[in-house]
Amino acid sequence: KSPAKKIMQLLIESGAKVTYSDPYVPSFNSNGNQFISSELNAGLLRKQDAVVIVTEHPDIDYKMVADNSHLVLDTRNVLAANKSHNIYH
């Protein structure tokens, strides 16, 4: 079972509007909700209040994620070398 699904469900239950991007999971259902992966790009990131990195994928441009996000919660430590003020590990 994916930790991302549980995290998304907890955020939704707390009133958050959740968007996700995963090149390996184009869509899924969880608790009666249909989720469709969004294309990860600078424009999408700038529209989000926060970004949570739950899974590490080798083909994700994490520098682009860090540079275009207001706040990043990096649960995989993929941005460990990035000391930006908006990244939390």
Image: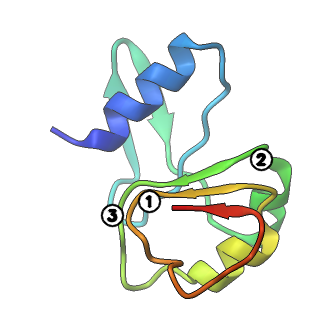
Residue 59 placement (x, y as % from top left): 43, 84
Q: Residue at x 60, y 53 (%)?
A: 38
Q: Name the mark on residue 89.
A: none
* Camera-nearest residue between 3 and 82: 82
In the displayed structure, 62 sits above or below 70; it is below
Query: In screen coordinates, is 83 left or right of 9?
Result: right
Q: Report which residue position mark 1 lands on.
A: 22
How far apart, in angstroms, are the residues tagged by discs 2 and 1? 16 Å
Q: Residue at x 44, y 19 (%)?
A: 33
Mark 1 surroundings within 10 Å by alpha-carbon count, few (fewer than 14), some (14 through 19), many (20 or more): some
Contact flag, marks 3 and 1 (Cβ < 8 Å): yes
In the displayed structure, 74 sits above or below 58; it is above
Q: Nearer the viewer, mark 2 or mark 1?
A: 2
Element type where label 2 sits in the image: loop
Pick whichever of labels 2 and 3 is earlier in the sequence: 3
Residue 72 placement (x, y as % from top left): 65, 58
What residue type is disc 2 on?
Gln
Query: In screen coordinates, is 47 left or right of 81?
Result: right
What residue type is disc 3 on?
Tyr
What residue type is disc 1 on?
Asp
Element type where label 3 sits in the image: loop
How far apart, in angstroms, are the residues tagged by discs 2 and 3? 21 Å
Element type where label 1 sits in the image: loop
Contact flag, marks 2 and 3 (Cβ < 8 Å): no
Query: In the rendered image, which quarter is residue 1 located in?
Result: top left
Q: Name the mark on residue 24.
A: 3
